[in-house]
């Protein structure tokens, strides 16, 4: 494993995007792995994040990633064990560390936590993850001190298990799932992590939605992530979608997001019973979302189609990358995952090409300002057609976050 890491020195220092891979992503990933041809240079995969429930089904895609030399990180989904819902989901039954009852704040013992930590690593070794991603429980606001203690024990046990018994030594990435109060006290988390020999930190907040949350909340989140980088290890921000580019510009090297998803972290929603979820859930279910680079936004299929069917707008949003070249717009929804991967790769490459922090910040500023302008044009055009245009207010908020954080670093 050390050899594989040695071949991937860029993963942790350069801006990096990791797709969250699901069973629906096979074709897009296959295409990316097929690599460059004479006429197009293809998409490069720096790595991939696979949910444990998917990895447990032993999908051929895992083997393809392995053969392609793509490092794999497995999200053990242990935060789900604190809800009821996992008990009703068949895929969880395949996880050897699935508990029989939900974990409550007063149920874990030191030995049950040590067992969980170890079983997660054994599973990750079994599915040949490139690094260990530690078991974590949510840092809920309620009873935070107890949840912190549980997580300390999990991390301690994970570090102790690395290379002990039948577990190989692999790089260890500590997972944290902070709630609102934990995010507000980064020093609390940083001081705890500083005690352990970890190679990275994976952050999956309990509730974060970069396209809906306000500036204050996003700034707080960014400061939390930046505080963790002070440990000198790379930080991976989970499920942040295009906001990951803002994070990249601010020195958070890595982010993950599903292909073509307008993603957000919402553990309560994942853990809610399905019936409740259907009534409160997205009305756009089944609507295929499409990412438009110039808008830095994943749009519903309905809105994307309205834009692309509008001739004056279309020319502005034409995608000239390998995914769409010579293909017209008609079938964009069908290849939306490939398109997402290509566009994201293109965005990351542009960031990597800027060698200094300031140049990266300038680039993302410029892109967001362009996106704001493009968003105005779209809204105007669609409103004139009698369609309720999509909302791009998050772009203004992201610009504000970037402004706040860069003033801060210039003052420091
Ligand atoms: Zn495209």
Image (cartoon, rainbow, N blue to C red):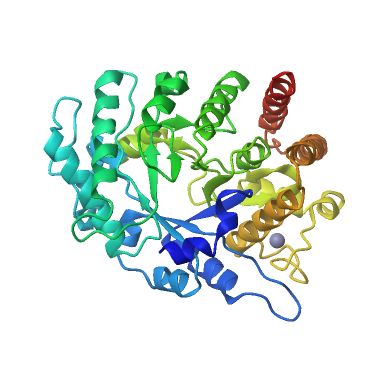
208 above or below 60? above
Instruction: From the top left corner, tell me how far across and down residue 305 is, in percent.
Output: 69, 52
Quadrant housing the N terminus: bottom left
Instruction: Please give the name of the residue rendered at 70% of the width and 28% of the height, measured from the top-left corner.
Output: 402
Q: Nearer the viewer, residue 355 or 53?
A: 355
Q: How many marks?
A: 0
Residue in the image at 74% along x and 81% along y: 38
Q: Position of residue 350 (x, y in %)?
A: 75, 52
The percent coordinates of residue 4 (x first, y second) are 47, 65
Residue 393 or 60: which is nearer the viewer?
60
Residue 293 makes an appearance in the image: yes
Q: Residue furthest bottom?
A: 38
Picture residue at 73% right of the left edge, 62% below the top: 329
- Residue 56 seen in this snapshot: no
Q: Quadrant of the C terminus?
A: top right
Q: Residue 320's x, y, as percent?
A: 79, 63
Name the quadrant containing residue 349: bottom right
Residue at horizontal 71 percent and vertical 57 percent from the top: 346
Ligand 1 image-quadrant field: bottom right
Q: Nearer the viewer, residue 75 or 132?
A: 132
Q: For residue 169, which quarter of the picture?
A: bottom left
Q: Is residue 55 above or below residue 249?
A: below
336 vs 162: above or below: below
């Amino acid at each position: 494993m050390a050899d594989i890491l040695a071949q991937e020195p860029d993963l942790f220092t350069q801006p990096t995007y990791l797709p969250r891979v699901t069973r629906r992503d096979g074709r897009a990933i296959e295409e990316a792995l097929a690599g460059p041809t004479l006429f197009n240079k293809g998409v490069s995969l720096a790595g991939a994040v696979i949910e444990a429930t998917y990895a447990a089904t032993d999908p051929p895609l895992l083997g393809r990633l392995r053969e392609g030399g793509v490092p794999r990180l497995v999200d053990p989904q242990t935060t789900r064990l604190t809800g009821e819902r996992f008990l009703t989901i068949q895929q969880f039954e395949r996880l050897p560390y699935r508990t029989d009852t939900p974990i409550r704040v007063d149920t874990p013992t030191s030995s049950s936590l040590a067992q969980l930590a170890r079983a997660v690593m054994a599973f990750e070794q079994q599915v040949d993850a490139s690094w260990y991603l530690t078991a974590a429980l949510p840092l809920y606001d309620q009873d935070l001190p107890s949840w912190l203690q549980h997580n300390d024990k999990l991390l301690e046990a994970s570090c102790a298990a690395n290379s002990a018994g039948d577990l190989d030594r692999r790089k260890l990435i500590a997972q944290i799932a902070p709630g609102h109060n934990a995010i507000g006290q980064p020093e609390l988390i940083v001081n705890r992590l500083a005690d352990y020999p970890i190679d990275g930190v994976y952050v999956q907040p309990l509730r974060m939605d970069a396209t809906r949350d306000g500036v204050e909340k996003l700034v707080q989140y960014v400061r939390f992530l930046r505080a963790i980088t002070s440990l000198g290890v790379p930080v991976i921000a989970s499920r942040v979608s295009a906001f990951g580019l803002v994070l990249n510009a601010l020195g958070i090297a890595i982010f993950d997001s599903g292909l073509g998803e307008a993603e957000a972290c919402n553990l309560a929603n994942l853990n809610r019973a399905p019936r409740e979820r259907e009534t409160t859930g997205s009305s756009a279910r089944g609507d295929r979302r499409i990412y438009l680079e110039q808008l830095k936004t994943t749009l519903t299929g309905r809105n994307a189609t309205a834009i692309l069917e509008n001739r004056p707008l279309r020319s502005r949003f034409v995608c000239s990358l390998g995914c769409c070249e010579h293909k017209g717009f008609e079938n964009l929804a069908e290849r939306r995952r490939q398109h997402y991967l290509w566009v994201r790769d293109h965005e990351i490459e542009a960031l990597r090409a800027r060698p200094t922090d300031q140049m990266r910040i300038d680039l993302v500023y410029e892109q967001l300002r362009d996106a704001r302008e493009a968003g105005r044009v779209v809204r105007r055009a669609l409103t004139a057609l009698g369609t309720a245009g999509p909302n791009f207010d998050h772009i203004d908020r992201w610009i504000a976050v970037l402004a706040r954080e860069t003033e801060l670093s210039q003052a420091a």
